[in-house]
Amino acid sequence: MVDVDRSDPDLKFLVVDRNAFSDPATQAEWAQKRLVWVPHETAGFVAASMKKTQGDEVEVEFVETGKKKMVAKDDLQKMNPPKYDKQEDMANLTCLNEASVLHNIKERYFSGLIYTYSGLFC
């Protein structure tokens, strides 16, 4: 990690308090739900919980609507645990896939954390 001057007033646009995301109960709840990203026509990707597997398809339940749908295994993308929400450095994501990167950027944008970087490239 890069040395950061904590007195820099612009730091509020880059760094988030990691302690807010390390709640063990939240992490356990996330693991129990088996959450994944599912492609969506208008939203890009939406969160869903894996329910059961049948061959090359998985039944998922969408988090926001509760609707169930069969989806090809190859279309699912892994979701990062909540402790990785709003990462400053995309290289720190455990699941570095399209859906997770887009989610991270969206979460940061709506929280006023408008800057990010990926590994060595700022």
Image (spheres, helix red, strand yellow):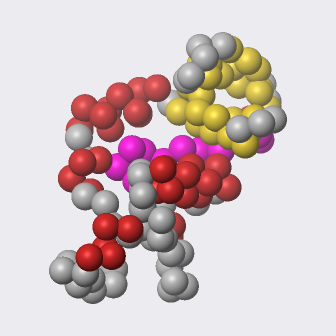
Query: Is residue 98 rendered magenta in the image?
Result: no
Left or right of 74 on screen, residue 20: left
Q: Measured from the top left, where is residue 94 in percent x and y?
A: 48, 58
Q: Measured from the top left, where is residue 56 in percent x and y?
A: 79, 30
Which corner quadrant of the image does residue 88 belong to? bottom left
Residue 95 seen in the current view: no
Which corner quadrant of the image does residue 11 belong to? bottom left
Which corner quadrant of the image does residue 51 belong to? top right
Residue 70 seen in the current view: yes
**Viewer-closest of 75 and 104:** 104
Quadrant assignment for the N terminus: bottom left
Left or right of 122 on screen, residue 39: right
Q: Residue at x 31, y 60 (%)?
A: 16
Q: Is residue 53 above or below residue 25?
A: above
Number of numbered callouts drawn:
0
Q: Is residue 39 above or below residue 11?
A: above
Left or right of 15 on screen, residue 90: right
Image: magenta residue range: 74-84
Q: Residue at x 68, y 14 (%)?
A: 68
Q: Residue at x 59, y 44 (%)?
A: 78
Q: Measured from the top left, where is residue 41 in percent x and y?
A: 81, 35
Left or right of 26 on screen, residue 89: right
Q: Measured from the top left, where is residue 2 in percent x and y?
A: 33, 84
Q: Residue at x 38, y 69 (%)?
A: 14
Query: Is residue 78 rendered magenta in the image?
Result: yes
**Viewer-closest of 15 and 83:** 15
Q: Is residue 20 above or below residue 69?
A: below
**Outermost residue, front side:** 9
**Outermost residue, top side:** 67
